[in-house]
Amino acid sequence: MQRSVALRLSAASAAMAVAAGVGVVLSMPEASAATGTATGFATQNGGTTGGAGGQTVRATTGTAIHAALCGRASSSTPITIEVEGTINHANTAKVSGTSCNTAAGVIELKQISNVTIVGVGSGAVFDQLGIHIREASNIIIQNVTIKNVKKSGSPTSNGGDAIGMESGVRNVWVDHTSLEASGGESEGFDGLFDMKNNTQYVTLSYSTLRNSGRGGLIGSSETDVSNSHITFHHNLYQNIDSRAPLLRGGVAHMYNNHYVSLNESGINSRAGARAKVDNNYFEDSKDVLGTFYTDAAGYWQVGGNVFDNVTWSAPGTDNKPAGPNPQSNTTVSIPYAYTLDSAACVPDVVSRTAGAGKGLQVSNGSCTVQSPTPTPTTPPTSSTPTPTASPTSGPSQPGGTNLSIGAGSDGSSKAGGTSYGNVRDGDLNTYWSPAGSTGAISIKWGSATSVSKVNIREAAGAAGAIGAWKVINGDTGAVLTSGSGAGAVTFPRTSLSKVTFEITGSTGTPKVAEFETYA
């Protein structure tokens, strides 16, 4: 267990109709104040767009935020909520509705999707009030400050986490936020940025995490290893005792972050986790990378980092620091494109871009700060990522939530070394193959699910192998559509509990890396 340390502080109804009483909820044009596009692992699994394309409303209280969520036509209707002012316990009440599941004393994003919360105007401050994301997908949080959220004492909120995610969360982009505490666990605080119980495809970018005993965790225990595909880039971790972050199982990518005054430990990779640690600047800190407080080893791939006045403890049974001369002990493939600022310029770039109220400035990947582009341009290239297979035919990548993740899957046959579950794990490096040149693979749910699109992604080296195919309603045996070649396929929206992709012709042995399904 982590030992207790003294923190050294460097600075200590219904819905839309409630506007008049709870703050401002005003219909706005569809243009959103949210700027830029998601980066890192949040670009995978169909991407993260938040409330893009939906209504934009303005809120000045927590109750108004909840009212905006509850006033939607459904729990997945896209919405952008522009927030200005101080959100606190006094102005955050539960609001009821069929499109929401809220609670008092916390901003509750539960069992919903397609939401953007963005600070505007003079800024948005969540004072002693956390944001809880649970059983949710496609969420963007941008340009807000969240401070002094407590799990003990008074008032309490969100288990003491500034931002907490749990229970099947997918595709979250948190950008240009300021996350702050005023002490450690003994002062009533917990983590600034926590993920647990099957949370995946998350990016934290251009944010500051300050003055806390715990920066954040990925996995709540040594057995909670279902969390993965997390990116941290261009963030400032300052005056943090530990967990910058703590990673149990899964894969994380940390690049171009500035770590200052990590007092006890930093990136703690354990329980089989794999961290890719690129071009970061570690300064005035201790044990910034390794496996700490456990004998369950984790792994890392390092390159281009600067270690400025970093001290390292002696290794022991429950203490395996990566330094004083950190070397890679694994390799980690990154499926998205990115550019790396030189580590030497990271402190300057991060100081000008990270946190709320910085004008959403970003780096151009060459140590120069610029305003973000509102729409994607030519994707940057990286000197290090490993490309993954793309669909060889059909429409462009579908958006929204991949309903296959976490679903059951089966098939008509197995090939040696492959598993049906490999088509729904979000990993393009694993795949399923039939025993021969034809076969079928299915995605199943415990109850009827509406599906109108599937995306068949072939494994690297097998692109073009899939020939003729049929998409079949597994409940009735009806053929929904047919064609040839892998890629995205649409058909009339159908409610079913099982959908089957049957390969009826191929060249060689097909390899299906992902069988994605979308509503």
Image (tube, helix red, strand yellow):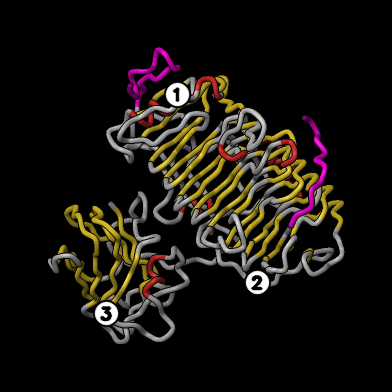
Q: Secondary structure at mark 3?
A: loop
Q: Residue sitting at 61 percent across and 26 percent down?
A: 127
Could you say which is closer to the camera, residue 219 or residue 359? Answer: 219
Q: Residue at x 24, y 65 (%)?
A: 499
Report whether residue 363 is seen: no
Where is residue 419? Give x, y as percent. 40, 77
On residue 412, the disc is 3
Range of residues picked out in magenta? 1-29
Q: Is residue 41 left or right of residue 255?
A: left
Query: For numbered disc 2, what is the local secondary structure?
Result: loop
Q: Identify residue type, mark 2.
A: Thr
Which image quarter: residue 273? bottom right
The residues tagged by marks 1 and 2 sit, at their Cα atoms, a distance apart of 47 Å
State the residue position of label 1: 63
Labelled disc at residue 330: 2
Query: Which marked residue is nearer to the observer: mark 1 or mark 3?
Result: 1
- The answer to which of marks 1 and 3 sits earlier in the sequence is 1
**Can you say which quadrant of the picture contains the N terminus?**
bottom right
